[in-house]
Image (cartoon, rainbow, N blue to C red):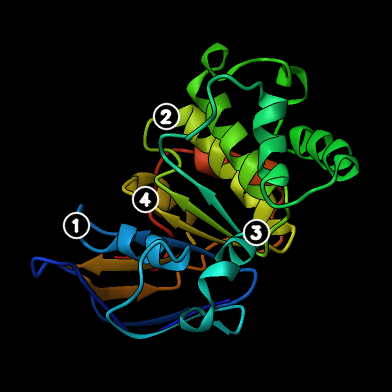
Amino acid sequence: MIEFRGVSKRYSGGDVGLDDVTFSVERGDFVFLVGATGSGKSTVMRLLIKELEPTAGTIRVAGHDLGEIKRKRIAYYRRNVGVVFQDFKLLPARTVYDNVAYALQVTGGTRREIREKVPDILRLTGLSTKLHNYPDQLSGGEQQRVSIARAFVNHPPLLLADEPTGNLDPETSVDIMRLLYRINRTGTTVLIASHDQAMVDKMRRRVLELAHGRVVRDEATGFYARDETTREFARRLRAPSSRPPGLA
């Protein structure tokens, strides 16, 4: 689904975003991108949505070379990439329903598609009773659910989440991760940039760690049942922290 080959990004002024980064993410994977502030996580995310262009190297998504996508096709490409932000980026003057519907409207969705898809995604994200509420009437967790619903309403094959639990309490964070796991189980590839080391440890998914723009760790932590239900998944995340057997 994602392939970086020798990717570097240097900003004007000489700052290094990425330095010769190579990694790949398979279809259907659930991967964490971790690292300190300034390590390159946001640069990876911005490159994947073509908000930035690499200085060197090749980036492929679903087999397509992003460098070959013409400017007029970028909007079409982004229809296939859902993005969730830490600060939600909801439209304050629109209801929950309209915030999610807007994602379909800007990509050319018909009224029929909107009527069919929006209620379905609101049920999936647990927002069926909030469709007429405005963002300022919602909790932080509910606002993040709206953000996820908007990102997933087109059922994109790839979902990027930049610090999706950064402003949330631990219990709400578990609920958001459970929702992202449910989306992953539908077949969508999920890449999450996160500072929440405790949550990352409990998730036990693959971890890519960046430092000073380079990949310093690529660890497939598979101490979990691949077929666990979302309920089992949430129960494990809420359990007291413990290291998986066999790890020092």
Would you say 107 lies left or right of 190 here? right
Sequence-wise, which precedes: disc 4 or disc 3? Answer: 3
Q: Residues within 10 Å of mark 1 (few under 14, many from 20)?
A: some
The residue singled out by tag 1 in the image is: 38
Q: Amino acid at mark 4?
A: Ser
Circles 4, 3 touching at the beta carbon (< 8 Å): no
Q: Is residue 175 visible?
A: no
Q: Residues within 10 Å of mark 4 (few under 14, many from 20)?
A: many
Q: Residue 185: which quarter of the image?
A: bottom right
4 vs 3, front mark: 3
The residue singled out by tag 3 in the image is: 79
Q: Quadrant of the C terminus?
A: bottom left
Q: Amino acid at mark 1?
A: Gly
2 vs 3, front mark: 3
Which of the two residues, 131 or 195, is positioned nearer the viewer here?
Answer: 131
Q: CA distance from mark 4 to mark 3?
A: 23 Å
Would you say 230 lies left or right of 92 here? right
Q: CA distance from mark 2 to mark 3?
A: 27 Å
Residue furthest top as drawn: 137
Q: Amino acid at mark 3?
A: Arg
Q: Amino acid at mark 2?
A: Leu
The residue singled out by tag 2 in the image is: 168
Sequence-wise, which precedes: disc 1 or disc 2? Answer: 1
